[in-house]
Amino acid sequence: MLAQRSWLIALAVALALVVGGVAVLLQHSSTHPLVNHAASVPNTTLPAPTNLSTSTSVIASSSPESRNLTSDGQFHIAGSVVYDGSFAIPGADPRSFKILYYSPQHHTKWYESDNAHVYLQTNVLPGADPSSFRIIYEKADGEPSGYAVDRKHAYYFGDQVPNADPATFSVLLDAMGFATAFATDSRAAYMNGIVIPGADPRRFALIPDSIGSDSYAKDGTHVYTTDFATTTVITGADPSSFSIIYSASFPPYSINGGEVDFFAEDKNTVYFDQHPMRGVDKTTFSPLYYNTDSCARCPNDEWNGYSKDRYHVYYLQNVIPGADAASFTIHITAADSQQGTNGADAKDRYHLYSQGKVIQ
């Protein structure tokens, strides 16, 4: 009997402990943030529970693990540092860092930003506002134009455009939809982000041509041309009648570094780039192209600097004294091409010529 009573007492104590433990657990759970009591409290609006996934993300972002930001790994994070290739971007915030433009195919890097700064590659863009910063893109292929704006400034390749009005700032597109280096706003016209003195932004426009060049522009008073370093007013040119009539490239002799140059005309004369060609007969003037089977006014025919009208022969913008226009040709024999220091590149019935000078 004593053994049986002892066993019953032990069982009663165990049951009491279990019941007491459950009561304590229930009392504790009433204040625990991870327990949802909504089902047991009808018609009561509870505070929204803490978003644990967001909290976890913030904690993880405060110490970001190494990861690539672009498919090729050009931009990546290591620890708490953002890198462009092997170069750290000083002060960049890995939690808010984003790439505004990068083309792995062309390895073209433009702007990035975080909550505090805008970056041009690895350099902070002074004064730029990341919340309003936007790149101005080309219409033709969606590539960046070189220009960008935020709510206070305009930029050209990272440099602030002085006194520009970002609200009205616009990049001029060529006939093919590609961005040019020309831009306007309510205050001025610009080339390469530099103010063009005296230009009227209200009437400033590109002068179109067949290959989408931005070599010429005009307003109501002047015609402008550019070599992409400086912009020049063509003295005496008439903007109302000015048009591009020929393009000329220089593969044979790399004149002007192989760039494309242009002939233009207005009601007064013909121009080679910004140079007026005095005394030209406009009705018979033409550059002398190597490819005579193609249209004389088609772009990119090879040209070695010569042109003529019925009276004169020209090398670039200059008359060649004494050259015979009727017989002058750039189609010469192999033997002729070996004459002189640089070899002949043209002839008439009297002489051989090299780069506009008589050699024989």
Image (spheres, rainbow, N blue to C red):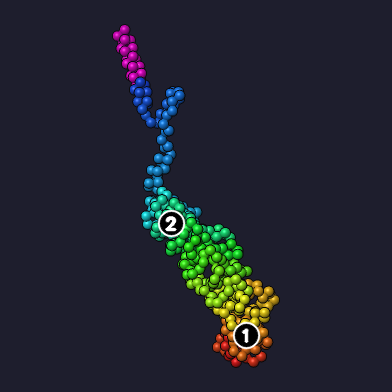
Q: Residue at x 63, y 79 (%)?
A: 287
User: Dividing the picture into quarters, in which one does residue 261 lie?
Assistant: bottom right
Q: Amino acid at mark 1?
A: Val
Secondary structure state at the residue bearing disc 1: strand
Q: Secondary structure at mark 2?
A: loop
> Which of the two labelled residues, at mark 1 and mark 2, occupies the earlier sequence position?
2
Q: Give the answer, above or below, for where 324 lies relative to 152.
A: below
How many numbered discs sit on the rendered protein? 2
Magenta highlight: main SS: helix
Give the Cα separation between the discs numbered 1 and 2: 54 Å
Which one is in front, 153 or 250? 153
Q: Nearer the viewer, residue 210 or 264?
A: 264
Marking on residue 313: 1
Callout 2 crowding tier (Cα within 10 Å): few <14, some 14–19, many ≥20: some
Where is residue 294? Give x, y as percent.
68, 74
Q: Quadrant of the C terminus?
A: bottom right
Camera-near label (1 vs 2) is 2
Task: Tell whether 275 sits left or right of 14.
Answer: right
Give, as a three-letter code, the residue at label 2: Lys
Residue extending furthest toward the right: 293
The answer to whether residue 236 of the structure is visible from this angle is yes
223 lies left or right of 55? right
- Magenta residues (range): 1-21
- Numbered mark located on residue 129 in the image: none
- Residue 247 visible in image: no
Judging by the rendered image, the residue that carries numbered circle 2 is 152
